């Protein structure tokens, strides 16, 4: 491309040069106006695109939220997620297109306007100024008179020459600027528009590829939509007969014997409030997992537990009330008045609550008894194996006690027998003599063949040969000429020694050799100056010192003494207060009376019930404690257990009473074994 006009015309500043300048000035002014409009619309397009992308992204996010609504319907949820992901991809493509439009069109055209066309304007202003200066210089030079002095003429001539020279340089520079911009504008405009078209082409190619990939999926969605529409139409046809349900369905719910969520019965009942106005509210009730629960019709997802444990409750019809079909649920601490909608519902609800109470009791019985056994069945091999394993474990613990690896009387190795009330191990020869003493002196059991309860084994572990011999053989060196038997001693030698040791107690030292602090508060017998055995027995039961109890028994203490006790509590009472099952078992093994009453008429069983000690209650019932004995206020253990809402103790007492009643039937022995096993499991 050539300059807009020749240099000669420019140097001559001819009208042709001026016309060319005016024409190009007008041309570039027109271009500037049009480019500014293009740039404005381009920026509006970019802004609108960004706004569109924002709304499009919001649309996609709302679609994803809709998919969360269908999280229980995988087909719809997955389809919505797939559509949303595809739209996310198109948003990415749009974002790239907008970015390329901004960089290729907006920035390039803006640069051309702000730099190149502005340079033409600046050059034009400079040219117009120097052109005006030249015209002024020419006019002054022409106005100089003929008779002017030479200096004045020379001055105007010099100014004219300098101004003309500057004009020509400026005119050439302006010609250069215009010519360059006129040439540059073609590629400066076409290039960004070409880039924009490439960006558009890429955008549509990417979109085409995307939807080619998703085309099978879209067709699949179309098929699913058709199928879903058919299902809706089928549902609409099915629901067309909805009114027939009112007459064809039974309006009285049936009892549910078994459900997945443990709900036996549910439905609406009226509940009388405890407010002074005794208003009635309709609530949805459910019997579930031995609980009575109710909730409001709306806004009460969790519900309210009316009764935590139905085992402690009873139900009865209410006749002395002005409303029909009412019944009362009675718990140890309160009662609830409920009303059914009809006589049929009234009967069904009472039966359901009664069945749940019975089922809860049966569940407690079966959970405490051996797995899979009925009341009349024999023990299974699996149960016997479990008991054998527990017995073996107890035997190991017993033999590990100091001195128990040898016979307590003759020191023979590997003893296989034990005296459970004395807390010692014996060889077979000495065990035979112990049996002849009678169970009131020594209760012999086999370490190998007999079943060992945990509490009996704990008595053995708490004592042992070393401790017992420190009591029963404390005066061997100063005693008569009796010799302690050896493993190979004769029967006569063993018999004489054991009789002297456990029956006559010749080797027991009556002098106190224990804690000096205890001696300061002990009760001393005036005649002998010895510690009172009855006081020592009571103190041992009170403080949990089984060794003191053993020593007191060796000193002929009264097993049922109330020595030094203003409330007339026997050692069994004190052992219960101490909370020790082992002490209680030890006293019972040694002949303590289980039904002894204190000053308030309370037995150890009633006292354990008041204190909420199910382990002690179970042990006492296992040893045939009489639960029918009431205290001075007329309260029996069952009355106290129900008032304190102790479910375990209530269950023990009720099942024990049931077992007592069954002893007179053909299932008596099996029922007793079941209760014994339940207590044994609880004490483990």
Image (cartoon, grey):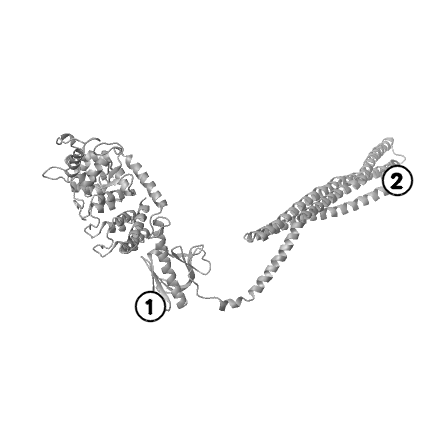
Query: Does residue 382 sit above or below 288 in this rendering?
Result: above
- Dot 1 corresponds to which residue? 319
Answer yes or no: is residue 568 visible.
yes
The x and y percentages for residue 8 are 88, 36
Left or right: 438 as drawn, with respect to 251: left
Q: Is residue 151 left or right of residue 658?
A: right
Q: Position of residue 7 (x, y in %)?
A: 87, 36
| Whole-percent x, y for residue 342 in the image | 41, 68
Q: Is residue 64 left or right of residue 249?
A: right
Between 13 and 610, the one lying in front of the other is 610
- The residue at 77%/47% (across/down) is 34
**Residue 24 picture location, percent across and down:** 82, 43
Residue position marked by numbered label 2 in the rendering: 14
For the point 38% across and 67% down, which residue is it? 325
Q: Of the numbered discs in the image, which one, if any, rests on residue 529?
A: none
The disc, 2 or 1, on the residue closer to the chain's N-terminal end is 2
Question: Of all residues shown, which one is farthest toward the right?
Answer: 146
Q: Nearer the viewer, residue 259 or 561?
A: 259
């Amino acid at each position: 491309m050539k300059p807009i006009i020749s240099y000669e015309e420019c140097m001559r500043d001819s009208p042709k040069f001026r016309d060319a300048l005016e024409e190009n000035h007008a041309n570039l002014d027109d271009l500037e106006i049009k480019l500014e409009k293009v740039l404005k619309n381009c920026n509006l397009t970019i802004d609108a695109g960004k706004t569109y992308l924002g709304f499009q992204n919001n649309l996609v996010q709302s679609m994803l939220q809709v998919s969360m609504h269908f999280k229980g319907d995988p087909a719809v949820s997955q389809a919505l997620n797939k559509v949303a992901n595809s739209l996310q991809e198109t948003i990415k493509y749009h974002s790239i297109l907008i970015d390329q439009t901004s960089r290729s069109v907006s920035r390039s055209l803006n640069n051309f306007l702000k730099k190149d066309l502005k340079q033409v304007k600046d050059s034009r202003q400079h040219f117009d100024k120097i052109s005006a200066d030249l015209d002024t210089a020419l006019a002054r030079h022409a106005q100089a008179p003929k008779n002017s002095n030479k200096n004045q003429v020379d001055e105007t001539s010099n100014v004219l020459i300098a101004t003309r020279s500057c004009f020509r340089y400026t005119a050439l520079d302006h010609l250069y600027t215009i010519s360059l911009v006129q040439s540059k504008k073609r590629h400066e405009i076409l290039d960004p528009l070409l880039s924009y078209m490439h960006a558009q082409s890429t955008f549509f190619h990417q979109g085409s590829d995307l939807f080619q990939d998703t085309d099978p999926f879209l067709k699949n969605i179309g098929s699913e939509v058709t199928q879903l529409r058919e299902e809706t139409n089928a549902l609409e046809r099915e629901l067309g007969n909805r009114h027939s349900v009112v007459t064809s369905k039974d309006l009285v719910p049936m009892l549910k014997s078994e459900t997945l969520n443990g709900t036996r019965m549910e439905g609406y009942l009226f509940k009388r409030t405890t407010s002074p106005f005794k208003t009635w509210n309709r609530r949805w009730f459910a019997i579930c997992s031995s609980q009575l629960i109710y909730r409001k019709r709306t806004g009460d997802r969790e519900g309210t537990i009316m009764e935590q444990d139905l085992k402690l409750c009873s139900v009865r019809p209410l006749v002395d009330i002005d409303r029909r079909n009412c019944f009362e649920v009675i718990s140890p601490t309160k009662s609830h008045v409920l009303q059914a909608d009809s006589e049929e519902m009234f009967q069904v609800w009472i039966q359901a609550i009664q069945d749940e109470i019975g089922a809860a009791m049966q569940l407690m019985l079966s959970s405490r008894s051996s797995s899979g056994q009925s009341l009349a069945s024999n023990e299974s091999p699996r149960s016997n194996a479990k008991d054998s394993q527990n017995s073996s474990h107890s035997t190991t613990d017993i033999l590990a006690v100091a001195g128990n690896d040898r016979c307590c009387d003759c020191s023979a190795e590997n003893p296989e027998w034990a005296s459970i009330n004395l807390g010692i191990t014996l060889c077979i020869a000495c065990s035979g003599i112990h049996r002849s003493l009678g169970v009131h002196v020594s209760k012999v059991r086999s370490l190998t063949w007999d079943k060992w309860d945990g509490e009996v084994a704990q008595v053995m572990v708490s004592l042992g040969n070393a401790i017992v011999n420190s009591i029963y053989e404390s005066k061997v060196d100063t005693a008569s000429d009796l010799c302690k038997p050896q493993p190979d001693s004769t029967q006569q030698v063993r018999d004489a020694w054991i009789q002297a040791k456990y029956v006559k107690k010749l080797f027991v030292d009556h002098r106190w050799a224990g804690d000096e602090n205890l001696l300061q508060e002990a009760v001393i017998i005036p005649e002998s100056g010895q510690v009172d055995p009855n006081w020592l027995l009571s103190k041992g039961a009170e403080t949990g010192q089984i060794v003191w109890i053993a020593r007191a028994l060796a000193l002929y203490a009264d097993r049922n003494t109330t020595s030094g006790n203003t409330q007339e509590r026997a050692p069994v009472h004190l052992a219960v207060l101490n909370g020790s099952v082992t002490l209680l078992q030890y006293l019972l093994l040694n002949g303590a009376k289980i039904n002894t009453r204190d000053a308030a008429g309370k037995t150890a069983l009633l006292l354990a019930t008041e204190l909420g000690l199910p382990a002690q209650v179970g042990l006492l019932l296992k040893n045939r404690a009489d639960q029918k004995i009431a205290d001075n206020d007329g309260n029996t253990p069952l009355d106290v257990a129900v008032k304190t809402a102790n479910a375990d103790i209530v269950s023990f007492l009720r099942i024990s009473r049931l077992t007592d009643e069954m002893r007179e039937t053909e299932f008596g022995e099996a029922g007793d074994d079941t209760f014994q096993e339940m207590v044994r499991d609880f004490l483990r």
